[in-house]
Amino acid sequence: MSAGSMGNAGRLFDVTVGAGDGWIGEVPAGGRLRIVDLCGNQAVDTLFFDAHDYANRYSAVDTVREQGAAYLTTGSVLLSVDLDPLAVVVADTCGRHDTLGGACAQESNVVRYGEHTRHQHACRTTFVRQATAWGRGLEKRDLTHNVNFFMNVPLTPDGGLSFEDGVSAPGKYVELRAERDVLVLVSNCPQLNNPCNGYDPTPVRLAGWSS
Amino acid sequence: MTAAPGAAASATSAGFTHEVAAGAAWAVRLRRHRALRLTCLDGGANVSVLMYAAADPLERLDVPDTLKAQMSACVRAPMVLMSDMGRALASVTGSSLDWHDAVTGHSTDRQVAARFGPSDYAADRNAWRRSARSGLTDELAKHGLGKRDLHATVNFFSKVVPAGDERGSLVFAPGHAAAGDWVELRTEQDVLVVLSSAPHPLDPNPVWAPARVEASVSAVAAPGPDDASRVFRAESGRALAAAERTFV
């Protein structure tokens, strides 16, 4: 199967992740992962780990520095802290994805929006919940700066950074090829307080193929 | 935002000064409300900094949270450096420079060897080329921490500018820091600071030329209601208040 194909051959999984829900699973070396923004403007917070060494995990700042650019799109190589390629973006109908904005947390929501958001659901709660369910030693210590697929966080020459309305739309997708066996941890963002989900979190589709 | 040299100091005890050698790593535990002033002793300095809550190092500096809450693509005064638990770790009380990079990471042995050739203690003694990563992980290990505790560093004295184009190109600004440039932090809870003075990985200098940095520590007053970091943004004030709650 090649990038862009959605056939059944070699299919590993094909799941719909509801708004505010999460997913964790492995994609083998050479396998593909497609993330589809079913309804548009939905941030998909995602972490990647070397499936055989969780300490060798995705590094946003190393990825950004080595490609010389802040945004991820087709051709972007997602690097680990050891500068090993974990995955490559092989198709992207959205065009721009963030990796410097991090994931929302109950604690960061309080900082950004006030105490009344303390008990709203947040991505890093989904991350710890999925990590705990996965087991195998994966825990909060392993949760680091993530990719925000379909999210738009422009940086400006005068040093500005802001969360802007999504550049995505219904049916837009991004597809990655695993460069080694990887563990993928996803939070389908439940954020209600900024435009990253168009103020209405919606489901996304995750499909994986072995080649 | 540029403050006059010395404006942020106001020490209430003698404190101490330590010279971090060029291209070396150092870790220091600091109590709350200490000023940590870093001063470049040579031009072209870079100081890559990791930070942890001393009480529980699982709480650590979170650069994305720090930047998005204060809507900045870099670290500058009077921003608050925030932990992943929504609490202030330190405030940037002043600096002679208006830009400190936090989005492009730090050097690794693989990169340093590829650019500058092999180097080891046997050949080069204490001038051997140690990457920021090797120095930081050495110091982390002394505190029971390791690779899993790495996070995005703040690279004080380095500037990497977004070009504003479609892909968000990031451009290193050579010569940003000169000897005498400084930044001062005020700790807002007890912290572990781990730093390396190895050159920034995007520094185009064809010669390995790490710079010496002076670290000066002194006790300072707690931030008052009108403190510049507290009133900078509502988000900055909330992170400070969250840190203060833990000392009630």
Image: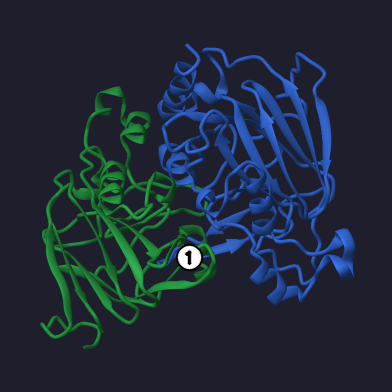
Residue B74 versus residue A29 in the image, above or below = above
From the rendered image, report the letter of the chain displayed in blue. B
Which residue carries the number 1 mark? A80
Residue B4 versus residue B123 in the image, above or below = above
Along the line of sight, the residue nearer the viewer: A184 or B187: A184
Which residue is drawn at the image coordinates 63% and 46% (left, top)? Answer: B140
Image colour for chain A is: green
Which residue is drawn at the image coordinates 74% and 57% (left, top)? Answer: B175
Furthest residue in direction bottom, as rendered: A1
Which residue is drawn at the image coordinates 54% and 33% (left, top)? Answer: B79
Residue A52 appears in which quarter of the rendering?
A: bottom left
Image quarter where the N terminus of chain B lies is top right
User: How many numbered markers are drawn?
Assistant: 1
Residue A67 versus residue B162 in the image, above or below = below
Label 1 resides on the chain identified as: A
Residue B43 horizontal side relative to residue A40, left or right = right
Along the line of sight, the residue nearer the viewer: B139 or A32: B139
Image coordinates of residue A96 in percent, x first then y, are 33, 65
Mark 1: secondary structure = loop
Image coordinates of residue A14 in percent, x first then y, are 13, 69
Which residue is drawn at the image coordinates 65% and 70% (left, top)? Answer: B111
The amino acid type of the residue labelled 1 equals Ser
Residue A211 horizontal side relative to residue B216, left or right = left
Image coordinates of residue B131 in percent, x first then y, are 70, 61
Residue A86 versus residue B58 in the image, above or below = below
Label 1 neighbourhood size at 10 Å, few (<14), some (14-19), many (20+)? Answer: many
Image coordinates of residue A11 in percent, x first then y, are 16, 78
